[in-house]
Amino acid sequence: MKQVREKHIRINMVKRISAVILLCLIGAGLYAGYVRWNMSFIVGTTCAGFLFALIIFFNTKGYKKPKQHTPSVPVYHPDAVPFHEQAGNDRLLLCIHGFPSTPGDFHRSWPLVQARGWDMAGPLLPGCGTHPRDLISTTWWDYLEYVKIEYIRYRKIYKTVCLVGSSMGGSLALAVAEDFCKVPELKPAGVATIGSPAVINAWLRHGIVMNPLGYCARMIGWLCRSIGADYEDQNRVGEDGDGNWKGYVGIFPRQAWTLQAGLSQMEKRLPEIDCPVFISHARYDKVVPHKNSLVIAEGVSSEHIQMYIANMDTFKHAHHNLVLYDSQREKVWSAILDFFETYSV
């Protein structure tokens, strides 16, 4: 833990130095503008810069209390049905799907998991798998609270519970581990992430910008609740199993803001995770930049960390959800289960 604290002291120092350098550059630019142009240029530039800074600051502040999740709407596709596959084992993989996906991403891997002597469960996150309008009222904290409730329920039943999450599901798994790693009776035996973000936009700290509009997502959400929200075409044929994805398509600005704010909290607490951590990602992931895998690896304090980086350059799909792809599914699960069975059981 001492090394972790020292590392974060260094990180904070780099942030401060970077901020000072940035302010100096802004000041130099304003002075140059004043010399070359006039005071009106300075006033206009200063006001624009202040407004931009205010938007960014406001976009990452304010948290909402989670709502009680009571699903009452039928799912729109069989892949959206939550599952708990039992084969009489005392160890469980709790699998958390991404945003806005379905448990089916994991359920099709059940034969592989069963053959290795594990049970498997996959909850359906609030707002997912029913109708796109149901997602609009949800937030990161709703997803996290629901996963924590499900985790505690299964942790009381099984001797060993490992968390596995794809995309945002992996981020939620890390956030759950942060809450319970210091609680002996609830500590997870291990965590595995698959193409998961640690940050959305963190250009100064990590050189990662998933979407520049994320800086204004909260304000956009006031004006537009969703853009192009719909079901994925159930008849879509994608290469390498990509067509099996059955989530929602479209843009959900308010949810994007809550993810950004929630991930900010999660990233700060990564050093609290000291259970075994497996990190998988595809290079050139078109959804979540693979630099996120390094942020997670450098942030956690676990003694056992393993990374799996997939090369999928021959395919044209998103290179994102590794367990969805026929070419990667068995490889990824074998690596995850080998890791868990070595360090977590």
Image: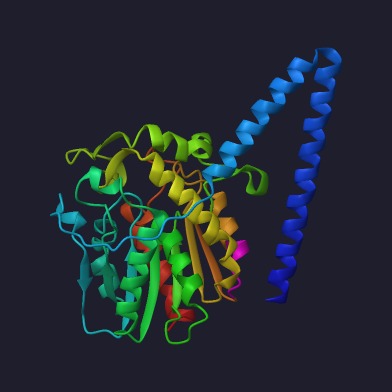
In the rendered image, the vertical position of residue 259 relative to residue 21, given as above or below: below
Q: Is residue 60 magenta?
A: no
Q: In the drawing, does residue 13 fall left or right of residue 68?
A: right
Left or right: residue 37 compared with residue 159: right
The residue positioned farthest toward the top in the image shown: 37
Could you tell me which residue is drawn at 30 percent across and 45 percent down?
A: 136
Whole-percent x, y for residue 295 in the image: 59, 57
Picture quadrant of residue 153: bottom left
Seen in the picture, residue 55 relative to 280 is either above or below; the reply is above
Left or right of 193 in this view: 48:
right
Judging depth in this view, the residue of 48 and 228 nearest the camera is: 48
Total labels drawn: 0
Q: Is residue 331 visible?
A: no
Q: Is residue 111 left or right of residue 64?
A: left
**Residue 170, position as x, y percentages in the image:** 43, 60
Query: Magenta segment, which residues?
Result: 297-302
Q: Quadrant of the C terminus?
A: bottom left
Query: Could you say where residue 46 lies in the image, as x and y percent from the top left?
Result: 71, 27
Q: Quadrant of the N terminus?
A: bottom right
Query: Residue visible at 37% across and 83% down?
Result: 160
x then y, percent, for residue 264? 54, 55
Q: In the orientation shown, which residue stands out farthest toward the right?
A: 35
